[in-house]
Each structure stands twice: as structure tokens, then as C-alpha cells.
Amino acid sequence: MKKLIGFISAQFLILSAYAPLSQAATITYFQNLNIGGSLYNATIHTSGSFNTIWDNNGNGVFGDSDGSIINHSPTFWQSSNASLAAQAVIDALGTSDTYDGLHDRIAVPYDTTASNTLVYIDRFNGLTNDELWGPTGLLPSDDYTILFPSNPIAYVSFENASPVPIPAAVWLFGTGVIGLLGFNFRNTKK
């Protein structure tokens, strides 16, 4: 039994050592954001341009294995839907979060080029009033200056949320427990 506990502990150490490496370029991940009645998972990317995230070789073709972080086109194809998505992310971030020493700044693409990207700023007046400003051309002049796309902003990518069915999760957990019990039972008979 002590060997089994040692083995399981070693596996957790190995898994925890590799987990942070895969999330190095991401500061925030939200699950099950309700955007227009559909659920999405959103990832905020703090490094990388539009092309490095969606279209690494800049040929306008998405999903062509060109080394992009995301292997499909941006999710929302209308600026109004991108606005709903940006509002959902800003609401999830809340008023106390900041990015790069300023209030939250996010970019939500709605087309195949970086020029068709809505840039939003989350600013607050006091601690309780949370406002969303955007797109770029509509920002008030006394607010933060965004020299798009040269200023660092965080792009947001979206994936359709597909929750794991409860019966499948229970079956997987049960199979693992039965396997461990069988391993333990076999060792106690010797």
C-alpha cells in the first residue's frame, strides 16, 4: 500500500510540473460564458498578435496547420456579437482586475483580419461602477489612448463549451477506483 501511495504521489508531482508550462501565454480562462444564449469558454491571450493566434502565416486561411495558437477562425462574425462577447468577458473579470497596470483591455476579433477587431477597455469610476468602452473609434478622448494595434492588448479566443456528461465522469472515476482496489486486493493475497 505504501508503494501505491508513493506511486500516486509521484504521478501528481509529474503532472503538476508540466501543467504551468502549457498555460504560459494565458492569464485568464473562463468557462461557460453565456453569450447570446450559447455557452463559450474564453481564453485571454496576453502575448501574440492576431496572426500568431489565428493565422500565423497571414494568408487568410484558418485551420491550415500554420503554427497558429488557435486552429480555426475567430468565433464571432458580426461586430454586435463581438460586443456581446466582450461584455461577457468584462463582466467575468469584474471591477478589481487590471492588466498591464491599467484597467482591463481586451480585443475581440469579428472577421479574418486584425483591422476588424473591436478593442474594449474596462474602466471604473470608483470601486463599484464598471463601464465598458469600445469599439476603438468610440473611446472618449480623455480615456486611455489605444494606438491599435501597437499598444499591448489582450486578444480573446472563444470555443464552444461542451461539458463532460456526468455519467461519463462517474464511470471514469469508478473505473479508476475499481482498478486501484483490484491492485490492492491482488497485493494483499500474496
Image (cartoon, rainbow, N blue to C red):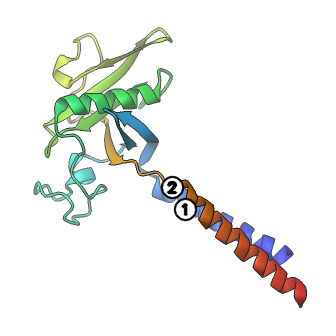
Q: Position of residue 128 (x, y in %)?
A: 49, 11
Q: Secondary structure at mark 2?
A: loop
Outermost residue, front direction?
167
Task: Give the Cα separation between the discs numbered 1 and 2.
Answer: 5 Å
Q: Position of residue 66 (x, y in %)?
A: 21, 64
- Per the image, the residue denoted by label 1 is 168
Task: State whether residue 101 appears in this view.
Answer: no
Under mark 2, the amino acid is Pro
Q: Which mark is residue 6?
A: none
Task: State whether residue 74 appears in this view.
Answer: yes
Residue sitting at 18 percent across and 57 percent down? 62
Residue 76 higher or lower than 1, as above or below: above
- Per the image, the residue denoted by label 2 is 165
Q: Residues within 10 Å of mark 2 (few under 14, many from 20)?
A: few
Outermost residue, left direction?
59
Q: Position of residue 19 (x, y in %)?
A: 54, 59
Outermost residue, bottom direction?
190
Picture quarter containing residue 154?
top left
